[in-house]
Amino acid sequence: EPEVTQTPSHQVTQMGQEVILRCVPISNHLYFYWYRQILGQKVEFLVSFYNNEISEKSEIFDDQFSVERPDGSNFTLKIRSTKLEDSAMYFCASSLQLSYNEQFFGPGTRLTVL
Amino acid sequence: QQQVKQSPQSLIVQKGGISIINCAYENTAFDYFPWYQQFPGKGPALLIAIRPDVSEKKEGRFTISFNKSAKQFSLHIMDSQPGDSATYFCAASDTGNQFYFGTGTSLTVIP
């Protein structure tokens, strides 16, 4: 069964450093998403991406964040200058269509900012 | 602003019992309501979803009840099993793009 994969599974970084979280969505999917989940809290939407551009983003997704699909398979989330409060589990998701369509989530990357 | 409110925060049910998790929303533009199941160390996985044109949807032991006028929907797990022990998130969407998740319910099914 096709699945979304994410690397690394755990990333530890110093405050102020840049991090890139990587995702490989399901191959025939067209819509890509990043969510985050602070420990013990709800899953929060960050951004959606379609046709090589951002289609929607939340208030959390400020200028420190960027997304990119550098090739035909990878989808990345970059945090330019990490803050302590960026520590969270980051989930990538993808879907085949937009409306009423299942978003398939990856296993997540745990980001720890020291 | 909390778009989707979920309760209870945690739930303990005996094996074979019925687990009920409730969600409420404010935005009447929401038109897609999925439930996700999350096991520790894993990403959320779609369990069942409903659109507001029906009041109930059943898939195996899992049923969503939807009350459009009250802006509430709930997940019922019949004959709960220890393998159902997980965190359950309700969500809502108006564009299919951004999902607004509830705060999650930690379900423990006691053998």
Image (cartoon, rainbow, N blue to C red):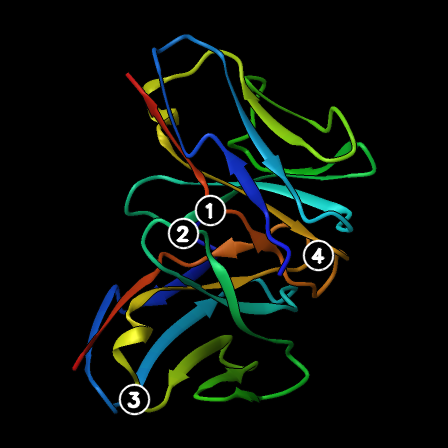
Asked if marks 1 and 2 touch (Cβ < 8 Å), the reply is: yes
Graded by Cα atoms within 10 Å as few (under 14), some (14 to 19) or many (20 or more), the crowding at tag 4 reads some
Of B72 and B76, which appears nearest the observer? Answer: B76
Kind of residue at badge 2: Lys
Give how far across and how far down residue A5 sits, in percent.
56, 43
Give how far across and how far down residue A50 sits, in percent.
78, 40
Looking at the rendered structure, the secondary structure element under dot 4 is: loop
* Farthest top residue in view: A16
Residue marked by disc 2: B42
Q: Sequence-wise, which precedes: disc 2 or disc 3?
A: 3
Q: Sequence-wise, which precedes: disc 4 or disc 2?
A: 2
Discs 1 and 2 share one subunit: no
Give the distance between the C-alpha atoms of the residues marked 4 and 3, in whole angstroms.
Answer: 32 Å
Say which of marks 4 and 2 sits in front.
2
Looking at the rendered structure, the secondary structure element under dot 2 is: loop
Say which of marks 3 and 1 sits in front.
1
Classify the position of the N terminus of chain A by image quarter.
Answer: bottom right
Give the distance between the C-alpha atoms of the residues marked 2 and 3, in whole angstroms.
Answer: 24 Å
The residue positioned 42% from the left and 79% from the top of the image is B75
Residue marked by disc 3: B18
Residue marked by disc 4: B95
Kind of residue at badge 4: Thr
The residue positioned 39% from the left and 84% from the top of the image is B76
Give the distance between the C-alpha atoms of the residues marked 4 and 2, in whole angstroms.
Answer: 26 Å
* Farthest front residue in view: A1
Give how far across and how far down residue A22 sits, in percent.
57, 30
Give the distance between the C-alpha atoms of the residues marked 3 and 1, in whole angstroms.
Answer: 29 Å
Looking at the rendered structure, the secondary structure element under dot 3 is: loop
- In this rendering, would A112 be left or right of A102? left
Kind of residue at badge 3: Ile
The chain to which mark 4 is attached is: B
Discs 3 and 1 share one subunit: no
